[in-house]
Image (cartoon, helix red, strand yellow):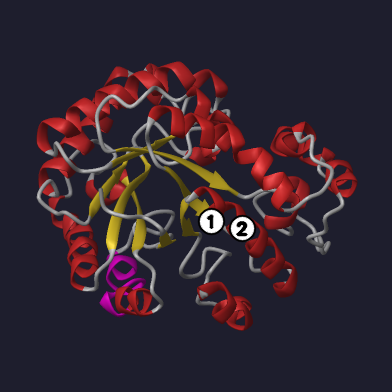
Amino acid sequence: MLTLKKGINLGGWLSQCNYTLERYETFITEKDFQQIANWKFDHVRIPFDYNLIEKDNGELLEENYKYLDNAVAWGKKHGLNVILDLHKTAGYDFNDFGNQEKNNLFNNAKAQERFLGIWDRVSKRYSQDENVVFELLNEVTNLEFIDPWNKLIVKAVETIRKNAPETPIIYGGVCWNSASFVKDLVPPPSKNIIYTFHLYEPLLFTHQKAYWVEALNNDRDIPYTDDMVFFRKESLALGYKGENIFRAKCKKMGPEFFEEFLKEAVETATAHGVPLYCGEYGVIELANAFETVKWFRDVHQVFDKYGIGHALWSYKEMDFGFTGEHYKPLRDFMLK
């Protein structure tokens, strides 16, 4: 199986954007792939939304596959593996948590047909590209989606395997790919399966001042301290988004917390004989740069201990941009 040890996300290029040709043509180019390779990353994760390649009515946008083609070709040219991550699909957007009318994928047969149709076409197109990995869907949210998501996973794997018997397939659990729900994932329906999770804990720190998180939409600076009492108290305003902090039994924030938080996911992946992979992790550019360094040092200590591959969120802009001014003083440290 190809390796996914040290990667970076190309968020905002083919997903979570204004879906214009200008965006597709200019936001990321081959020079970016060359830079990423020069920095010694071994892979890129490419979020793409269904409406890159389909209209809302289901009509195909065949011409737009060239952007995925470019990503695969540039990756191959510069020695990078490429994860094609379906970030949003018809009837499902991780941003629409709680909106059953919009997020109807798991009880809508037509939406599921479109989802499987996307993976049928994508897997046929890239079945012969040995640097490609398929990621079924980004950040499934609700707890009640566990069973229908597992059933859809099996169908998607079966669809892909008809076209691409060897290509690695990634899927993760509910609650926005929380490591806490890796244990509830369906056992691998085939070989070359990878379990994934995302890591933005403690949210109070990694998403401080985030305009899209109501409880954190303020100007308050949050330190990265080892004081768990502080994090438990201050995370109360986050409600369910702070549950991982409330449940933690460790006495200190740091490697002790991350090891406890990931323990069950590591054990589940080991029991099923599959790699465990962190598809997104990072700290908002509004956090203090030197506090950010401490967070990365602690997270990587645990990743390295358990051999967990990872992809930084994100390469450019998107409030977490690695190439932005915020990360300039940190870049050399992080690249090491």
Residue behind mark 1? 304
In the image, 272 versus 134, the foreground residue is 272
Q: Residues within 10 Å of mark 2 (few under 14, many from 20)?
A: some
Location of residue 25 with respect to 241 vertically, above or below: below
In the image, 311 versus 120, the foreground residue is 311
Q: What residue range appears in magenta?
A: 21-31
Q: Seen in the image, is 289 located left or right of residue 24? A: right
Residue 265: quadrant of the picture: top right
Give the residue drawn at x 56%, y 52%: 305
Whole-percent x, y for residue 274 in the image: 37, 36
Q: Seen in the image, is 188 located left or right of residue 313? A: left
Location of residue 203 with respect to 183 vertically, above or below: below
Q: Residues within 10 Å of mark 1 (few under 14, many from 20)?
A: few
Whole-percent x, y for residue 158 in the image: 20, 26
- Reply yes or no: does residue 27 show up in magenta: yes
User: Residue 195 bears which disc, if any?
Assistant: none
Q: Seen in the image, is 35 located left or right of residue 329? A: left
Task: Give SS at disc 2.
Answer: helix
User: Residue 301 bears which disc, if any?
Assistant: 2
Whole-percent x, y for residue 206 in the image: 68, 56
Q: Is residue 272 visible?
A: yes
Location of residue 286 with respect to 280 vertically, above or below: below
Give the residue drawn at x 56%, y 37%: 179
Give the residue drawn at x 22%, y 57%: 68
Q: Pointer 1 and pointer 2: residues touching (CB < 8 Å)?
A: yes
Residue 324: quadrant of the picture: bottom right
- Reply yes or no: does residue 86 show up in magenta: no
Predominant SS of the magenta segment: helix
Task: Give SS at disc 1.
Answer: helix
